[in-house]
Amino acid sequence: MAERRSLSFSGSHGAMLTTFREQDHARVCGIMFQTAAEGLVVVDAKGLIRLQNPRLAELFGYKDEELVGQPIEKLVPEAIASGHRAHRDRYLEKPQQRPMGSGLELRGRRKDGSEFPVEVSLNHFEVDGERFVMGLVTDVTLRKRAEHELAATLSDLEARVEQRTGELRQAEHNVREALERERELNELKSRFVSMASHEFRTPLSTIMSSVDLIGRYTDDARNEKVGKHVDRIRGKVRELTGILNDFLSLDKLEQGLVACHPAPFDVLDLCIGLIEEMRTLAKPGQAVHFDHAGEVREACTDRQMLSNVVSNLLSNAIKYSPEDRPIHLRTAITNGMLSIQVEDQGIGIPEKDQVHLFERFFRAGNTVSIQGTGLGLNIVRKYLDMMGGSIRFDSREGAGTTFFVEIPMTSESPH
Amino acid sequence: MKGSITSVQELILALEEGPGQDGYLSILKRLEIPVRDLVPLCTWHQKHYTRNCLSRNADFELFLICYEKGQRTSIHDYDSQEAWVHPVSGEVTEERFALGPNGALRLVNSTVLRPPTFSYMHNGSSVHRYVNTHDGRSITLNLYAKPLRKWKVYDETTGDPSTMSPGPQDR
């Protein structure tokens, strides 16, 4: 009886499952070689295939045994075949059991020239002093496809996450902006309420006191004094009307109810008319000088808006200047641009307030005792924006202010 | 001697021909334009007088100045070399002022102007004012040669306060 040597195969629970006689080893190994699910190839030191299993032939599209005696480079893409020989030689110098091409995307070449992704593990052995290398070849096409699909899915997911993150950031930004606008509105509302209560209360108090006094006069004293108080009432009502007009103008501008209608007109006629109308605002000794430079005198812009701008600047100059100080209005039309300067020698604007000058309801710190809504310059700027113009100023507290306005002359409105 | 000028168009044409040797006054003295022909060219404002330009070129400008009852101009002067004021309807009082050494204004002359008189100013050196003293509307025809480039308004501490609203208020 042949010596029984056992090959033990242990199952997962450690029991001895079967044993083979030694003479059966080769047959079993042969069966294993022939039936393995992976491709198996044995290559000699010259790189010639000495043994291959059916699976290998199947993977690469060859008939059984067709590859025996062929160089292993037949199974390698042509582009790298020559380099593969050098790899083989290097491996044989220091052979070891290891995966082939670690970190590389290996590809096999079929008989028909097509390529497919593979993984290869290498091992080596000697038989009768001759060295051989065994390769275990696995077709990883499906796995690679799955990997690519997974990568694509991950990439798509990342893109969606990024997009969503962007949307959330934008939403956060919008919310912050909305909160900031609300804060600004609240602040404006507070300033408006504060201004309105003061600016309305004062003239209304004056009106009420005049009415009270009128009621107390005897018949004899009535005629002369009543006239004086009626004038006071008239003046204060005019003030209130002016304040309300400011609000209405601003509201119309902000609602977009005002449009710019350019048309040609004589700028000197407009300015002379304005300073004539405004003469009653002047304080004792305040002269208003107007002059126009250059020959061109026809302007083309919205006449009413321009009138509002110049009126506002002139009335400010008068209001914030002391007696006996002149006000200068200068105009010129050069290279299609109307330039306007309004210069006064008044109280000027404190430097720290200058940056806020065109904000709604803003009053400079040195104007507390002077009546005003804080809307005029805001309205002026809005009008100029609509006319395509600009405004800037130079001011020194205690010395005076000069406003510089520039308005491009436009084509006449189709209206 | 040339004939009467009976329309605004004729007046403008005559002015455009130039003053000639006899000057612009000789043209104005030929005016016989009916007031009814001027009225359509007038504009009126409840709160202030109006300046209505009829014609302008490099040498002259012609205005119709329209006053409601009680309205007046500012106390002003300007840079025109010559100026004529010709009442065509109603009556205006012309007041001329002088500037004192301290800049104060002093009334030096007051004249009632009625049609068909003319008032003349030379070199724009006169500080003056017009007041509608008629019991109704008044109209003057004003001719300036050359057209105005400068206009200076003096304060009216001696005048009656008017009741005009200037527009947007303040800064």
Image (cartoon, coloured by chain):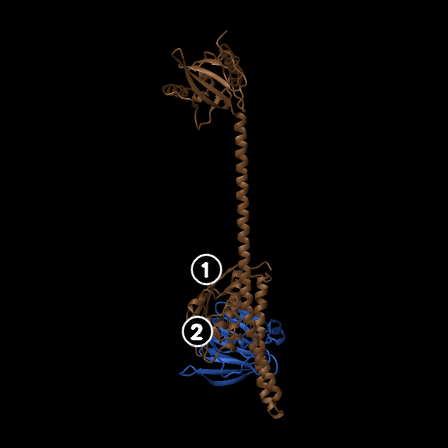
Q: Which mark is residue A394?
A: none
Residues A169 and A134: in front is A134
Determine the image quadrant of residue A185: bottom right
Q: Position of residue B156 (x, y in %)?
A: 49, 81
Circle 2 marks a residue in which chain? A
The amino acid sitting under disc 1 is: Asn
Q: Which mark is residue A347?
A: 2
**Residue shown at 52%/40% (left/top)?**
A158
Q: Relative to A71, say whether A171 is above or below.
A: below
Quarter of the picture containing the C terminus of chain A is: bottom right
Dot in front, 2 or 1: 2
**Residue shown at 55%/64% (left/top)?**
A186
Q: Position of residue A177 (x, y in %)?
A: 53, 56
Q: Position of residue A140 (x, y in %)?
A: 52, 25
**Residue shown at 52%/28% (left/top)?**
A144
Instruction: Identify by letter the chain in blue.
Output: B
Within 10 angstroms of label 1, few (less than 14), some, or many (20 or more) residues? few
Residue that sits furthest to the left in the current view: A93
Circle 1 marks a residue in which chain? A
**In this rendering, does residue A114 appear at all?**
yes
Contact (CB < 8 A) between labels 2 and 1?
A: no
Circle 2 SS class: loop
Residues A54 and A170: in front is A54
Instruction: Identify by letter the chain in brown.
Output: A
Residues A232 and B14: in front is A232
Q: Position of residue A328 (x, y in %)?
A: 45, 72
Q: Which mark is residue A335?
A: 1
Residues A384 and B59: in front is A384
The answer to whether residue B139 is left or right of residue A406 is: right
The amino acid sitting under disc 2 is: Ile
